[in-house]
Structure formats: C-alpha cells, structure tokens
Image: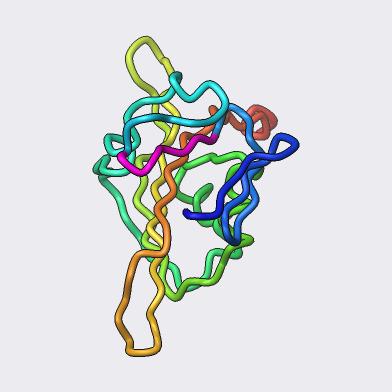
C-alpha cells in the first residue's frame, strides 16, 4: 500500500476506500504500529487471520453469501458483508466458519466466519486476493415463537 491516506473519515488505498470506524485499522510496513480508529482495542491481526475454524465450504460467487451463511447458523450483519460481496472479482471463495451456538448458562456464542478469496492470473496461478474475518451477531428467531 504505497499510496494510502486518510481523508474525511475514510482510508484510501490505490483502489479501495474504507469508512474508518472502530472496525478498521492498518499496520505499518514492519507490522508493528497500528494506525486507525481505536487501533489499540484490537487483538493481533495474525492471531485472527490464522484462526482455525471447524467447518468449510466453497463458492465460485458470493452474491448470495448472507443466505448461504444463515443456512449454516452464521449471522453476520450486512454492513460488514456488503463490501466483500461488492468486491466479487475472484474465482474461488473458501468459507470457513463456526456457527452460532449456546454455551454455558445458555449464553449464545456468536458465529465466526473467515473468507479466503482467491483469483487466478493469466498463467492459471491461483493466489489469495484477500482474507476477511467476521464476528457474528446474536440472532434468535421470533418467528419460531409463533408456531
């Protein structure tokens, strides 16, 4: 990211514009100094990116990713998924996940989803375009109460 800058609450790179809130930060070239809104509130990015999740499926297109994830009991807010879906310029998406579940004392543990987007170049070499990790939101259906 050679040409990156902040302006009017947005972080710009060569071809991406992110709204800066408490969800985003970047690291310097040495991976040490975090720059962004409340950057010190976040865990080490490598710990998050390298997290192993127990379930997996693949998609060639993620236009319906929200629906696919809800079928797996993973509830991720649209505001987080929509930017990834809008950047749908990859040929394969590996989706790793751990679904929402009930823990001790009936506590709901939210889902975690990791998307590894891959793209092949003109020579057919496949490389990782991006990795995105999302924490879910708690969802309990009210419709079930009506039955």
Nearer the observer, 56 or 102:
56
Query: Going by the image, does 128 lie left or right of 78?
Result: left
In reply to whether residue 141 is colored magenta, the answer given is no
The correct choice, above or below, for 41 with respect to 36 in the image is: above
- The residue shown at (53%, 21%) is 38
Position in image of residue 140 (x %, y %): 57, 28
The correct choice, above or below, for 90 with respect to 100 in the image is: below
Position in image of residue 31 (x %, y %): 32, 38
Residue furthest right in the image = 8
Position in image of residue 64 (x %, y %): 59, 62
Which image quarter: residue 40? top left
- The residue shown at (41%, 37%) is 27
Nearer the observer, 100 or 46:
46
Tell me the magenta residue range.
24-30
Nearer the observer, 15 or 89:
15
Query: Going by the image, does 134 lie left or right of 86?
Result: left
Give the position of the C terminus as an image quadrant: top right
Query: Going by the image, does 120 lie left or right of 61?
Result: left
Nearer the observer, 25 or 33:
33
- The residue shown at (45%, 29%) is 110
Which image quarter: residue 3? bottom right
Give the total number of marks visible in the rendering.
0
- The residue shown at (62%, 52%) is 83
The correct choice, above or below, for 57 with respect to 75 in the image is: below
Position in image of residue 106 (x %, y %): 41, 15
């Amino acid at each position: 990211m050679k040409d990156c800058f902040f302006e009017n609450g947005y972080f710009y790179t060569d071809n991406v514009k992110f709204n800066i809130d408490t969800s985003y930060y970047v690291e310097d070239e040495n991976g040490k100094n975090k720059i962004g809104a409340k950057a010190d509130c976040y865990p080490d990015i490598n710990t998050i990116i390298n997290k192993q999740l127990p379930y997996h499926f693949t998609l060639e297109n993620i236009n319906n990713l929200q629906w696919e994830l809800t079928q797996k009991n993973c509830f991720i807010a649209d505001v987080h998924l929509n930017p990834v879906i809008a950047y749908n310029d990859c040929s394969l998406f590996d989706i790793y996940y751990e679904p929402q579940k009930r823990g001790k004392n009936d506590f709901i543990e939210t889902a975690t989803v990791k998307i590894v987007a891959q793209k092949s170049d003109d020579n057919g070499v496949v490389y990782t375009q991006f990795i995105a990790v999302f924490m879910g939101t708690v969802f309990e259906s009210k419709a079930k109460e009506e039955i």
